Every structure is written in C-alpha cells, then in structure tokens.
C-alpha cells in the first residue's frame, strides 16, 4: 500500500496560478465511517494551512470503496512546501489504517474557470454579512455561500432533531408563526420556505432570490421568527444558546444542509405542482454516493418535458440526504419519480447504499410505494411570497 503522503518534489518550479490536487483512494471494507471521522478532523487542520483555498471529499456512485479528495491551493509553491513537511506526514498518519490503496495523485494548474453565470476567470470573493454561518462544499464554517440554481434561485436548508415525543408540539409551533417580510432589500427577496418533519428530524428549506446571507440575517432578526426559535429551544436534542452569538453561529453551522444539486425542467410547468420531500436512510459513509446518484437521475428526469419531475433539490451533509421535488402529479402516482429511481440498475445501486431493511426492494412498484410511505417527510408549512 502506498501512503497518503505526496512524493517529494525534485524541483519546485515557480508558478503564479492556483493549483488543483486530486488524490484517488480505495477505502477498506468496514473502515468508511472511521475514514470519515478522521477526515472530519483533518480537514479543519488543512484549512488553516497558509495557501489552502478549499477541498472536497467525493465518493464513487458505482463503487462506494472508491474515494477522491480534491483540494485547491493559492499556488504550487505553498502546496509543495506544506506537502513536503514533517507536519504533513504526521497529519495524515491516522488515515493510513483506513486506506487499502492510493491509486493516483494528480496536480494541475488552474488556467481557466467558468462560473455558474458562464463568465470565465478568477472567482471573486463573496461579500457576506458579518456573523452569519456558512458551509462550503468542503463543510468549513463561515458565511453562507451558495450558488443559484438554473432558474437563478438560491436554495439552502437547515436540519436538526427534537426530543422524541415532542414532535407534535414542535410541529404546532413551527406552523403557527406569522411569516416575516419577504422583501429584504433592493436585490434580495425571500421566495419560499418549506418545512418538513420525519420522526424527530426537522428540515427547513428556503429559496432566495439574491443574497442568501442577507436573507438569513433578515429572517433571524424578525421578532416573530425569534419568538418561534425561543419556543422550540426546550425541545431540541442539541441545546443551543441564542443569546450567545458564537454558540448560535456554531449551532446553525452544524445545522446547515447545503443544496448539493439543483435540477429545473426547461419547459415551464402548467397546472399545480406537488411539493414532496424524502429523507433517505443512508448506510454509514454513503451519503455522498447517494446524493450523486440522485443528482444524476434528476438531470435526466428534468430533461424530459413530458416527465413527472419539474424541479428537484438534493440537500446533503455527511449521511443526511434529503431530496425536495416539485412533481406534476401526486407523489403516490409516480413513486419512482418521487424517490429518484429510474430503472432496475439504478434501484439496485441505490438499494445497496441505503438501509432498506430485510423486506426493502426498490425494483418493484410495491417496494417503491412502501419505501415512499416510510421515508416521505410530513409537510409542516409551505409559504411562498408573491413575486412582482
């Protein structure tokens, strides 16, 4: 087995471009959760290294043992200085027991870049309101930074759990408050808020036109929202102190459930759309693979103008995966579309990544319907603003 340490570079050529590093790994059977735990600690250490820009951990949708770590660096020199250091070799030692093989380590200079809006060049930093949490693709805590979807709408979610037995009271509190003002400023507006529950897990999905950070700060300052947050505090499994800005910021950073993927049908929907959410029972370590598989399905499904899927957002953090869809028909009429299952092969792959239980089978209509009934999230409230 080769180690995770990069080979010593013979020459450190000068570079004035950013660097992309890709490390391909195979994780031992049964070691995925241990690998994730180690990575969770290491990524924060790496984030503090001078010259580090960002990193991502990816898992193959075809073989859950295959993983990819990508990172971006300010330039080649800063990366090589760090990777050749004794500190780096000590830092990655805990990973060695999880890895059965390191296939390849690749390094590329970043020469061109295309943003979501189609412009090429270097990314500009996003202006963020002070004090707001952010979860980047790598999971680092900071201000909200989310790209708009194909329709120009930014989507984000928060999730947390409440004490078992309190679900009914929490749902009552969360559904009974007065909606905050939708207009934030000249460029930012709250478009829609959808809140769901499954068991004791709460998921609040928001849609924003403009700045997500400005919108979240605006909502947090509204008296009616603050009253609701205080009212549900006694029922939360994880205690939080809203009066302590640092503690509140840390809680909402942990509660962030980023939009991993958004797909919107090119043809506008006619008639009523049915909003639906599913919480997937992900086996430990398979969250990224499940999210990627659902994203692949939704790209194809929304490309069909006659299909039932009008829009989809896959929210993902660690092994929490929630898929929010707008369907042209009720979910019960098209359980495969509601769940993101296109055919027998996809059903088999997804089934291996999920904890379906001994009777679970996504390859039959009966199995799909039973899974949908078991994993569908209950809608608590769904509020939209009127766009002008």
Image (cartoon, rainbow, N blue to C red):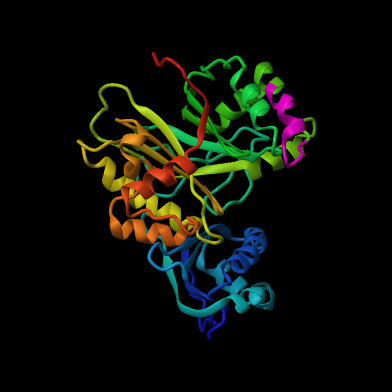
Above or below: residue 72 compared with residue 149: below
Say if residue 109 shows up in the picture: yes
Above or below: residue 178 compared with residue 7: above
Q: Is residue 230 magenta?
A: yes
Quarter of the view holding residue 81? bottom right
Magenta-tinted stretch: 228-240
Q: Is residue 299 left or right of residue 74?
A: left
Q: In percent of the image, x 60 and y 65: which residue is there? A: 33
Q: x and y percent of residue 69 in the render?
A: 50, 66
Q: Is residue 138 left or right of residue 172?
A: left
Q: x and y percent of residue 208 in the render?
A: 48, 28
Q: x and y percent of residue 196 in the render?
A: 53, 32
Above or below: residue 136 compared with residue 23: above
Q: Is residue 138 magenta?
A: no
Q: In percent of the image, x 47 and y 57: which residue is there? A: 354
Q: x and y percent of residue 99 in the render?
A: 55, 77
Q: Is residue 281 left or right of residue 33?
A: left
Characterize the magenta stretch by its predominant secondary structure: helix
């Amino acid at each position: 087995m080769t180690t995770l340490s990069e080979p010593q570079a013979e020459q450190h050529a000068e570079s004035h471009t950013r660097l992309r590093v890709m490390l391909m790994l195979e994780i031992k059977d049964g070691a995925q959760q241990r690998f994730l735990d180690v990575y969770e600690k290491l990524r924060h250490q790496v984030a503090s290294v001078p010259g580090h820009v960002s990193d991502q951990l990816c898992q193959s949708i075809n073989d859950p043992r295959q993983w990819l770590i990508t990172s971006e660096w300010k330039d080649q020199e800063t990366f090589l200085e760090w990777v050749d250091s004794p500190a780096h070799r000590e830092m990655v030692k805990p990973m060695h027991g999880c890895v059965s093989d390191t296939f390849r380590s690749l390094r590329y200079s970043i020469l061109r870049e295309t943003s979501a809006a189609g412009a090429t060049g270097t990314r500009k930093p996003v202006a963020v309101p002070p004090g707001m949490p952010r979860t980047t693709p790598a999971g680092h805590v900071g201000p909200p930074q989310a790209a708009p979807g194909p329709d120009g709408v930014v989507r984000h979610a928060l999730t947390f759990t409440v004490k078992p037995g309190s679900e009914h009271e929490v749902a009552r509190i969360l559904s009974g408050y007065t909606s905050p003002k939708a207009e934030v400023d000249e460029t930012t507006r709250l478009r829609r808020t959808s809140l769901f529950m499954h068991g004791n897990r709460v998921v609040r999905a928001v849609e924003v036109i403009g700045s997500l950070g400005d919108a979240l700060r605006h909502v947090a300052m509204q008296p009616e929202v603050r009253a609701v947050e205080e009212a549900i505090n006694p029922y939360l499994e994880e205690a939080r102190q809203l009066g302590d800005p640092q503690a509140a910021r840390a809680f909402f950073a942990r509660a962030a459930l980023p939009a991993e993927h958004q797909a919107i049908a090119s043809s506008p929907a006619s008639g009523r759309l049915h909003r639906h959410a599913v919480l997937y029972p992900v086996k430990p370590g398979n969250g990224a693979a499940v999210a990627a598989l659902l994203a692949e399905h939704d790209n194809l499904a929304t490309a069909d103008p006659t299909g039932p899927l009008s829009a989809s957002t896959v929210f993902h953090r660690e092994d929490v995966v929630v898929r929010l869809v707008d369907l042209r028909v009720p979910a019960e009429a098209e359980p495969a579309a509601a769940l993101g299952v296109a055919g027998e092969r996809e059903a088999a792959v997804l089934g291996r990544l999920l904890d379906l239980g001994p009777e679970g089978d996504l390859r039959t209509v009966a199995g799909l319907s039973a899974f949908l009934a078991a994993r569908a999230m209950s809608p608590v409230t769904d509020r939209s603003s009127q766009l002008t």
